Image (spheres, helix red, strand yellow):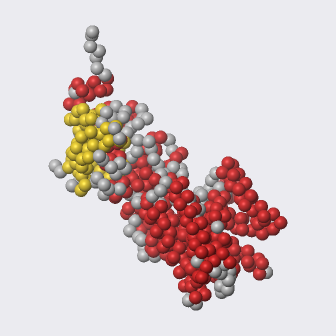
Amino acid sequence: MTAILDIKGLDKFFGGVKAIQNFSVELPEFGIYGLIGPNGAGKTTIFNTITGIYRPTGGSIRLQGRELVGKQPFQVANLGVGRTFQNIRLFTQLSVAENVFIACQSDADYNLLGALTRLGGFRAKEARLREKSLYLLDYMGLSQVAEAKAGSLPYGHQRKLEIARALALNPRLLLLDEPAAGMNGDESRELVDFIFRLHAEFKLSILMIEHHMDVVMKLCQHITVLNFGLTIADGTPAQITRDPGVIEAYLGREEQPC
Amino acid sequence: MSTYEQGIIILIGINIIAVLGVSILTGFTRVFSFGNAGFMAIGAYVSALLSLRAHAPFVAAILGGMAVAGAISWLLGKLTLGLRGDYFLIATLGFGECVRVLFEYLDPITGGARGMPGIPAKTTLPAVTISVVLAILLAWNFLHSRYGRNLMAIREQGMAAEAVGIDTAHYKTLAFVVSAIYAGWSGALYAHYLTFIAPNMFNLDKSAELTITVVIGGLGSLTGSVISTVLLTVLPEVLRAASTYRMLFYGVAVVLIITVRPAGLMGYREFSLAPLHRALDRWRARRLAAGTGAKP
């Protein structure tokens, strides 16, 4: 199986702080991989480095063999990397429909002249984008609230809207940053089914950060555990749960009797 | 219509065009510029020189002014739009003053601080009307396309805009160039209306006035910008006696708007007949219901 995302020896230092050290992962096409670790372990920094928000101190990030290091965030997005944000970043003053409609912009095949004069099939092309965004809204179950302001949605809907917006890019790789944050047991079980459906329907490879262990264990074929920027374990969910290093990072070490 | 009334309408039209540009830049992209009077000056001087020296036709003179303003804004945007918002604002402020001073120093070409008289009076009411209709139509089409939506995405959430593949630096430059082209258009009409231009007509006050007009009308609403331009052009004329206090009035209005109604007069909304249609539909439905209900 070929890797869609191949990260080798990734380092990111902020001055003296080593946020990520020697991180590597090889995400196969159509795989679902997870990143876990305590707060401040460097998980979101890895996402921000993949998507070009940060420039890594060292290492390489390849998407289907193409180097992503040095690319601008919008270029990474246009190569087929969709993402959601841990602290939700929607276009809050705009409607739910507009949020997705905007994200369809890479499909727009008219130029400035076409937009200004409305000639050259502009209306039909816009209608196609509109249709696509409505399909995505419907798929995410957001049709009912399509005209509501994105900022006024309840939390769970906002997370779904972020996913819908990421899907509008036609991504091959989807980076989910804590999709289950703030969800209760029922909601996160629903989320697991939902992500499986997305994965199949849109033929996605997924890399996700998540704290809910039940979600990660059910979804991910492979998990990397980070602590203070270091990879302390990686393997299948079953291997991870037995790893003494992981247990120590999450639960602490048993006091040695003195 | 008296020439006085015609004059006010022409001035409203000229201001609307400059304000539309600032509306796209500030209202829709949330990039603040205090240099747009500088682009008006460039449009005014370039078109006036084309008319006086080259005897160019009016349309060519206007297009020349717009093109030069657009080209200079593109260069300035490339240099300065990488700066954070407030630094960019200061850069444009400096640019506007530079342009004004430059036109004062270029005495042999521009007549310096004394100004430039004898520009042919070609800005008639029909010319302004056509310009305004065209300017509104183009701005509307621009905003209701991928281009305008991308600008709004940048306004709302820059990082998310990048994450959906929008080249934010490119689109900010585009918004800046569009605003400068509109300012150049407005300046060209202004020069050919007054038949006389001087550098101090395009000072910082003028730039501030453009931004204030957009803020009062509502950031993110073309309709608001147009309404607010009409109000702010007509009010000083109606209250002639108080016109000395114009800038004072602007200041108070902005403070009031920001504290009481930060969204401005229109606040993201555009004028549309949709609510009227909906009301009409409801009324029809009620009548229909009443009609069927009355039947035994």
Question: With B238 as the anchor, is B96 left or right in this view?
Answer: left
Rendered-image quadrant of the C terminus of chain A: top left
Give the percent coordinates (x, y) of residue A83.
36, 48
Give the percent coordinates (x, y) of residue A193.
33, 40
Q: Is residue B68 visible?
A: yes
Give the percent coordinates (x, y) of residue A218.
28, 35
Q: Name which quarter of the figure residue B276 lies in.
A: bottom right
Taking depth in this image into account, of A229 and A140 the one nearest to the observer is A229
Q: Residue furthest top?
A: A258
Residue depicted at x 66% and y 58%? B216
Taking depth in this image into account, of B127 and A80 the one nearest to the observer is B127
Q: Is residue A22 above or below residue B242?
A: above
Taking depth in this image into account, of B289 and A108 the one nearest to the observer is A108
Q: Residue furthest right?
A: B241
Residue depicted at x 47% and y 51%? B157
Residue depicted at x 73% and y 54%? B252
Taking depth in this image into account, of A10 and A208 the one nearest to the observer is A10
Q: Name which quarter of the figure residue A232 lies in.
A: top left
Q: Residue furthest bottom?
A: B55
Question: With B182 as the anchor, is A185 left or right in this view?
Answer: left
Q: Is residue B271 visible?
A: no
Question: With B39 as the anchor, is A253 left or right in this view?
Answer: left
Give the percent coordinates (x, y) of residue A57.
29, 46
Q: How many marks?
A: 0
Residue depicted at x 61% and y 79%? B107
Q: Name which quarter of the figure residue B162 lies in.
A: bottom left
